Image (spheres, rainbow, N blue to C red):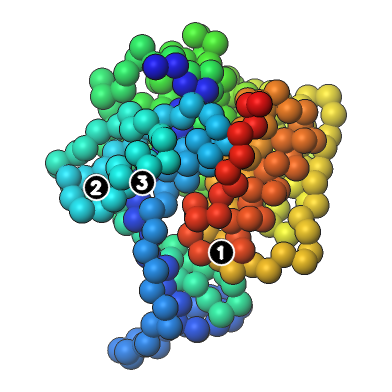
Amino acid sequence: MKFDIVSFGSAIIDTFVNTEIGEKNHFFRYPAGSKILIRYLKFDVGGGGTNTAVAFSRFGLKTGCICNVGADENGNRILDLLKKENVMFLGKIDKSGMTGYSVILDSKGGERTILTYKGVNNNITLNEVNLGLETKWLYYSSLLEKSFATQKKLAEIMHKKGTKIAFNPSSYIIQKLDFLPILKICEVLIVNKEEAIMICKRFKKRRWNLLKSLNKLGPKIVLITDKDNPAVCFDGKNKYSIKPHKNIKVVERTGAGDAFASGFVAGQIAGFSIQKSLELALKESESVIQYFGAKNKLLKTNIKK
């Protein structure tokens, strides 16, 4: 089967917990030794790999997902979700450990802290990936250990075949791991402003010109998000930007970054201009943040018409 895009990233179960405790000075304060009532408790399938894969599929793209799940109930739930969303599972049911799991602590003010157990997500080796894979694009969200090493090797193999690579690295990868080989060959780099500064600091690039500095490291297109401030993009020649709408009621931000990134990349796959891709990205992310869960309100529209 030939794919428009294959997403390679994590698959986890998200547990949303709200105790109505507000944040103070960027911290949540839970008194030690106390018992705190939970206002609501919700469960959903999450992880950068499945979030973006479902987004791409709902845009009408032929989509695969490379991720590992455990041989457990949570793993079955993830596999059922991918099947329901017409995403081909290209990973492995790993009996050596548990499916990934996250606890998302939502605050009274709309911010959240995520506690993540990676489980079997980081166990993917190159010999478990179909190297005969045919896809126009690969989308990488952050994985560590064996899985990150596999992403690096697969990127090199697929790039030589003409596959375009979109890369959304985490702060841990940026600070600790050797990700420059992926940067050099990726088509689109998606990071937030803090991550962009981290990359420039690590490679001693000018931090007052983030877009151009990152572009010189290899990515053909650099996209930087900045929460409620305009997202900016650079293709080596021109700068583009888009400003979030102020009248959007934010219910939960989990998955907003994945939604924005997948909307932009989907636009590029469909042949949209950069500005139109940014518009699609914003529409996708603003739909997600108005509801709970990273996938529940992803757009359903065929952009390949």
Q: Is residue 44 left or right of residue 107?
A: left
| Residue at the spot of label 2 | 76
In the picture, the disc for residue 136 is none
Q: Quick one: 212 or 141, which is closer to the camera? A: 141
Residue at the limit of the structure toward the bottom, as seen here: 34
Residue 269 appears in the picture as rendered: yes
Q: CA distance from mark 1 to mark 3?
A: 18 Å
Instruction: Report if the CB atoms under discs 3 and 2 are less than 8 Å apart.
Output: no
Q: Amino acid at mark 3?
A: Leu
Q: Amino acid at mark 1?
A: Tyr
Q: At x 41% / y 20%, what residue is drawn? A: 154
Q: Which of the 4 quarters of the picture holds residue 251?
A: bottom right
Residue 208: percent from left, percent from top: 79, 43
| Residue at the spot of label 1 | 291
Residue at the limit of the structure toward the top, as seen here: 161
Instruction: Report if the CB atoms under discs 1 and 2 are less than 8 Å apart.
Output: no
| Residue at the spot of label 3 | 81
Q: Is residue 97 above or below residue 267?
A: below
Q: CA distance from mark 3 to mark 2?
A: 9 Å
Q: Quick one: 272 or 66, which is closer to the camera? A: 272
